């Protein structure tokens, strides 16, 4: 049997696509993910994230394009891929009437892992689930269920894991703990390919792909993505930000404005000229005094701006 390639990227795709009848779920993905990387696919509901992961896991056949995962072909060698990677699906279900220990044992059997007990103990320790090992899965908290699901995904010691929205629905404290666990997994040399709708989580990835309507429209490190954002964002402070937002929305689309509790962000590709227009608009309507300052874009700002730019193009 062919051994996994070590001298090439762990994932490569060229124009990888998946259409369902006339619906385009994934279109022309060109990906290259290196060993040891944490790559995050970021996008809103329906962007095509889960479909992309299922294509890369060899669970779903592409309708176009090609690719390799762990050196195996995405169309012809899917069995080899499935046996070597770990996949935590978005709708991953544990067996509620089995204990924590029994769930892991079940997944060990599924992957034909012999002598899994040592690995199970390590994973329970790692995910801090050891005190709960005899508890039924249905009695675990949401965060603990996710950690158990992750432990099940890792039982066969894969080099590459696919995590589809692993922290969605998990409370912020457990999300933090979950991320610490993922960092630990990375230190062991595992490559992580994940999806997330949360831009604050995406900040933690080495590289991200911004996805919308089946396409990745920007790839790079979080810093590179933020630097690619054209124009300037201004923080606007005034006495009634909601009224100011409403007034500005008469002239600018929602992709240009973000309302926060006590201020708003105005993104302008043109810079100071357009800011002056916005200021004048507010002052003419008696919504001043208006103060402004420049702000560095967040990943969320960059996502919205780059998306808006792509759509208008
Ligand atoms: N089996 C299917 N048959 C038909 N259309 C599908 C199928 N699977 C996915 N789609 C469509 O493909 C698009 C992408 O779906 P996908 O589940 O990949 O998005 P997603 O980014 O994972 O969304 P979410 O954040 O909601 O999980 C959607 O429009 C979806 O309706
Ligand atoms: Mg999904």
Image: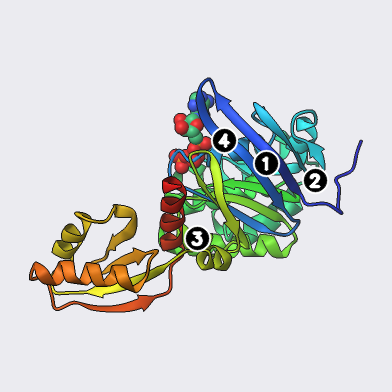
Viewer-side residue, 168 vs 295: 295
| Location of mark 2 (residue) | 115
The disc label shown at residue 93, or none: none
Q: Does the image show residue 20? A: yes
Marks 2 and 3 sit apart, C-alpha to C-alpha, by 35 Å
**Which image quadrant for residue 284?**
bottom left
Look at discs 1 and 3 and give the one toward the viewer.
Answer: 3
For residue 217, above or below residue 67: below
Marks 2 and 1 sit apart, C-alpha to C-alpha, by 10 Å
Look at discs 2 and 3 and give the one toward the viewer.
Answer: 3
| Location of mark 3 (residue) | 201
Marks 4 and 3 sit apart, C-alpha to C-alpha, by 22 Å
| Location of mark 4 (residue) | 26
In the drawing, does residue 89 fall left or right of residue 187?
Answer: left
Marks 4 and 2 sit apart, C-alpha to C-alpha, by 40 Å
Mark 2 and mark 3 residues within 8 Å of each other at the beta carbon: no
């Amino acid at each position: 049997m062919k051994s996994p390639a070590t001298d090439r990227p762990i994932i490569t795709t060229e124009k990888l696509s998946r259409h369902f009848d006339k619906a385009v779920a994934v279109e022309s993905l060109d990906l290259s993910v290196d060993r040891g990387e944490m790559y995050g696919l970021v996008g809103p509901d329906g962007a095509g994230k889960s479909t992309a992961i299922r294509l890369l896991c060899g669970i779903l056949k592409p309708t176009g394009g090609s690719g390799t995962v762990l050196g195996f072909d995405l169309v012809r060698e899917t069995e080899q891929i499935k046996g070597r990677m770990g996949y935590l699906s978005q709708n991953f279900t544990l067996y509620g009437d089995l204990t924590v220990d029994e769930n892991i044992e079940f997944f060990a059997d599924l992957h034909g892992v012999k002598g899994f007990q040592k690995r199970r103990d390590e994973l329970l320790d790692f995910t801090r689930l050891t005190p709960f090992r005899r508890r039924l899965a249905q009695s675990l908290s949401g965060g603990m269920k996710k950690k158990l699901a992750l432990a099940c995904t890792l039982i066969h010691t894969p080099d590459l894991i696919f995590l589809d929205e692993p922290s969605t629905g998990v409370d912020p404290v457990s999300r933090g703990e979950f991320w610490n666990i993922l960092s630990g997994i990375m230190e062991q040399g595992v490559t992580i390919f994940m999806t997330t709708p949360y831009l604050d989580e995406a900040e933690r990835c080495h590289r991200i792909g911004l996805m919308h309507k089946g396409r990745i429209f920007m790839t790079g490190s979080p810093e590179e993505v933020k630097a690619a954002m054209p124009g300037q964002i201004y923080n606007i402070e005034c006495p009634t930000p909601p009224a100011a937002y409403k007034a500005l929305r008469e002239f600018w689309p929602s992709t240009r404005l973000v309302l926060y509790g006590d201020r708003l962000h105005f993104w302008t590709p043109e810079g100071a000229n357009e800011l002056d227009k916005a200021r004048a608009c507010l002052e003419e309507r008696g919504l001043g005094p208006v103060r402004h300052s420049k702000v560095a874009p967040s990943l969320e700002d960059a996502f919205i701006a780059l998306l808006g730019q792509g759509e208008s193009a």
